[in-house]
Image: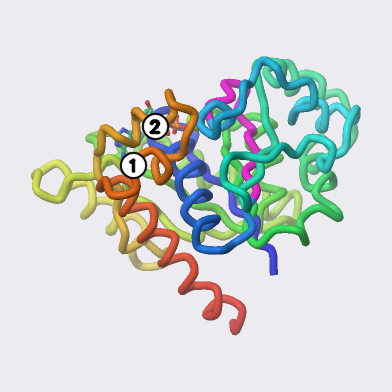
Amino acid sequence: MTEIIAILNQKGGCGKTTTAVNLAAALALLDRKVLVIDMDPQGNATTGLGIEKNEQNVTVYSILTGQNSLQEAIVKTEISSLDLVPSNISLSGAEIELSKTIGPHSILKESMDGVESSYDYIFIDVPPSLGLLTLNSIVASDSVIIPIQAEFYALEGMADLIRAMDLVETRLNSPSPIKGILLTLYDSRTRLGRDVYDNVKQYFGETENIFKTTIPRNVKLAEAPSHGKPCIVYDDECSGTLAYLKLADEIIKLEGVEDNK
Ligand SMILES: Nc1ncnc2c1ncn2[C@@H]1O[C@H](COP(=O)(O)OP(=O)(O)O)[C@@H](O)[C@H]1O
Ligand SMILES: [Mg+2]
C-alpha cells in the first residue's frame, strides 16, 4: 500500500528538506519505490536530488495550475527507485492563483489519482509557511512527520501547526495524523539537547509517536546537497547517513504494524 507522508513544520531550517531527501533515498536503497514531491518554491529538494531546478518546465506549479498531470512532471534521479516532482521559483506565484480556484486545498491530492499506486512511499517536502501550499500538502498526505530542531525555541509555533492540522481534519474532512516527531540537529551530550528532548516528550509524549531515531548534526548532511546527491550517495558511512538509514528502518518496521490496525 502507498503511504503519502508530508514533512511538515512552518519553521525554516529545522531539517524538513534534509529529511525528505535523505529518508526517501534511504528507503529507496532499501528496495522501496519512492517519490519526492517538492512543494517548496525554493526547490531545495530538487537541487538536493541532483536536478537543475531552473531547467524544469514541468513542475509542481504546472500541476497545481492544471497545465500538466503529476505523471508528466515526474523525473528520475540518480537512484533508480527514487523519482522526483521538481519545483522552482515559479511555484511562489501559485498560492495567489490557487486562492482564486474552487476547492483550492485539494488540488495536489486530486492530481495524485492514478500515480500513487506506483510507489510505496510518497514524501512531500513542505515550505516553511502555513499557506495554501502547506494546506494542500496536509490534505494530500496520509500522515505527517514533524522534524523539530533541538534548539531553545523548538516548540514555538507548534500550537499554530497543530491548529492548521486540526482545521484540515474538521473543515476539509481529511485527517492526517502525526506519524512521528523527529528530533533533528540533535546532540544528546549537551544540556540543551536533553532539555529540548524532555520538552518535546512532555508536549507530545502521551499521545504521539516520537521516533527513537534522532538525527545528529553532521556536516556531510549539509555538504551533500551542493553535490546534488543524497547523503547516502555522497558518504555512505557518515553519522548523518547512518541516522537516516536507521529512521528508514524504524518506518519499515511500522509497515506491518499500521496495516494491521
Ligand atoms: N542534521 C543536520 N546536520 C547538519 N546540517 C543540517 C542537518 N539538517 C539540516 N542541515 C542543514 O541546515 C540547513 C536547513 O536544513 P533544511 O533541511 O533545508 O531545513 P528546512 O527544509 O526545514 O528549511 C541546510 O543548510 C541543511 O543542509
Ligand atoms: Mg526546506
Tag 2 residue: 224
- Please report the residue visible at 69 percent of the width from the left and 31 percent of the height from the top: 132
Residue 207, by quadrant, is bottom left
Tag 1 residue: 235
Judge: label 2 CB < 8 Å from ligand 1. yes
Q: CA distance from mark 1 to mark 2?
A: 8 Å
Residue 187 falls left or right of residue 205: left
Q: Residues within 10 Å of mark 1 (few under 14, many from 20)?
A: some
Quadrant location, the N terminus: bottom right
- Please report the residue visible at 70 percent of the width from the left and 17 percent of the height from the top: 55
Residue 70, by quadrant, is top right
Between residues 19 and 200, which one lies in front from this camera angle?
19
Residue 28, by quadrant, is bottom right
Query: Which residue type does callout 1 highlight?
Result: Asp
183 is within the stretch colored magenta: no
Number of numbered discs on residues: 2
199 vs 158: above or below: below
Residue 60 falls left or right of residue 27: right
- Secondary structure of the residue carrying tag 2 is helix
